[in-house]
Amino acid sequence: MILDRFSRLPRPARIGLYVLATSIVLYLCLAPSRDVPGENLIWDKAAHALTWAILTGAGLVLSPRRPRSILAFTLGLGAAIEVLQATMGFGRDGDWRDFVADSVGVFTALLVWLPLRRGLLAKG
């Protein structure tokens, strides 16, 4: 299965891909609001949930043996970003509801990934 192939990449490549994904999320969340592409295209909370689901899913696919670490990292990143947005300016506002939406995305990714991972383990 294609998901299993990503976890077989060399560790530096997997880390590099995840750093790239995290960097994109950081830019989208911390750039001045006028610089964020398509900011008003979809509902804000749905965008948060989708972004964090993708980031978490990428981490789980790239490092399937470390699900707790991936979950802790993505939840911590979501909380840290909200604190930074609340304190930095640039037209961004920290909002606890955004963190709730981030958490929904994180746990949605986990709920999608778990049965996929169990299926891979059963075959392999």
Image (cartoon, rainbow, N blue to C red):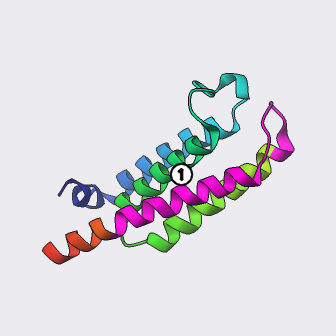
Q: Secondary structure at mark 1?
A: helix
Q: Quadrant of the N terminus?
A: bottom left
Left or right for 11, reference 37? left
Residue 124 is at least partly visible in this image: no
Q: Furthest-bottom residue in view?
A: 122
In the rendered structure, which segment of residues is drawn in magenta? 86-114
Residue drawn at the location 47% of the way across and 60% of the way down: 108
| Location of residue 120 (image quadrant) | bottom left
Place residue 25 in its image quadrant: top right
**Quadrant containing the C terminus in the rendered view:** bottom left
Left or right: 3 as drawn, with respect to 95: left
- Residue 98 magenta: yes
Image position of 14 with respect to 26: above or below: below
Where is residue 87 shown, x and y percent of the image? 86, 45
Residue type marked 1: Trp
Residue 89 visible, this orientation: yes
> Left or right: 93 with respect to 43?
right
Q: Is residue 73 above or below residue 26?
A: below
Residue 26 falls inside the magenta stretch:
no
* Mark 1 neighbour class, 10 Å CA radius: few under 14, some 14 to 19, many 20 or more: many
Q: Is residue 87 left or right of residue 69?
A: right
Residue 106: image x %, image y %? Answer: 52, 60
Question: Residue 5 in the image: x percent, y percent?
Answer: 22, 56
Who's the residue at 45% across and 49% down the image? 54
Residue at coordinates 37% horizontally, 62% vertically from top-left? 112
Q: Which residue is at 48% across, 43% downward?
A: 20
Q: Which residue is denoted by mark 1 in the rendering?
A: 52
Marks counted in the figure total 1
Q: Residue furthest left?
A: 123
Q: Quadrant of residue 110?
A: bottom left
5 or 46, which lies in front?
46
